[in-house]
Image (cartoon, rainbow, N blue to C red):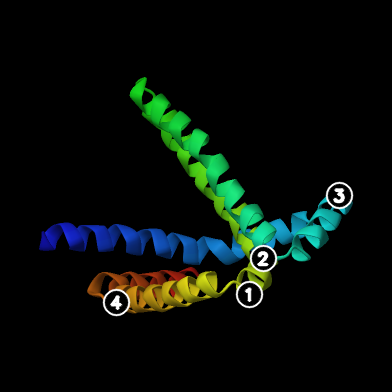
Amino acid sequence: MKWLRRAAEALLALLILFEEWGWEPLQQAMARLARLPVLRSLERWVGRLSPGPALAVFLVPSLMLVPVKLAALWFIGEGQPMMGLAVLVLAKLVGTAVVARLFALTRPALLRMPRFAAVYARWVAFKAELLALVRDSWAWRTGRAMRLRVRRWWR
């Protein structure tokens, strides 16, 4: 059971690292896209929502990705693993971008909900602890050193 827990933690760490590396740049890309007049007014509306509706607006895009992910599994099941993987990666990128932007817009309202604020605080603490473990690992330190050497060489 110990190896299963470690494997789950490693997968979760990889997911969190992807979110960390992608969350802010994708959110910023969505913010640039939101300069379009129609999206600008939609963002203002989302930013003014009360906690309940803000939670719904934040959760709906995540639920809308479920059929897309099922389609990716269907492609894989039909013998088209590359198509399934492409759909899954595209869904992850677009989903992360949309959810990151919506969270930036709805976070003030969501944090007014005591339960959400408590869960969010625990999530932030858990994520920080897990990222500290990952960043302290041999693989992370070696990869970072190699990246710095390649960057220096390139310059």
Q: Which residue is mark 2?
A: 51
How dense is the environment of label 3, judged by Cα within 10 Å: few (below 14), some, or many (20 and up)? Answer: few
Q: Quick one: 43 or 110, which is closer to the camera?
A: 110
Distance from label 2 to label 1 (Cα)? 7 Å
Given the image, on which type of amino acid does mark 4 rest? Leu
Tell me the quadrant of the picture where the N terminus can be found: bottom left
Q: Position of residue 32 (x, y in %)?
A: 76, 59
- Please, what secondary structure does the residue beneath circle 3 have? helix
- Please, what secondary structure does the residue beneath circle 1 have? loop
Tell which tag, 4 or 1, sits nearer the viewer: 1
Distance from label 4 to label 3 (Cα)? 43 Å
Q: Which mark is residue 38?
A: 3
Q: Is residue 89 left or right of residue 14?
A: right
Given the image, on which type of amino acid does mark 1 rest? Arg
Distance from label 4 to label 1 (Cα)? 31 Å
Q: Which residue is mark 1?
A: 112
Q: Residue at the spot x=40%, y=73% of the render?
A: 127
Q: Residue at the spot x=46%, y=71% of the render?
A: 119
Tell which tag, 1 or 3, sits nearer the viewer: 1
Q: Is residue 10 left or right of residue 122?
A: left
Taking the view exactly as shown, the residue that stands out farthest to the top is: 78
**Quadrant hosting residue 141:** bottom left
Sequence-earlier tag: 1 or 3: 3
Q: Position of residue 50 (x, y in %)?
A: 72, 65
Q: Which residue is mark 4?
A: 133
How dense is the environment of label 4, judged by Cα within 10 Å: few (below 14), some, or many (20 and up)? Answer: few
Q: Is residue 35 visible?
A: no
Q: Position of residue 44 (x, y in %)?
A: 82, 62
Taking the view exactly as shown, the residue that stands out farthest to the right is: 37
Q: Which mark is residue 61?
A: none
Distance from label 4 to label 2 (Cα)? 34 Å
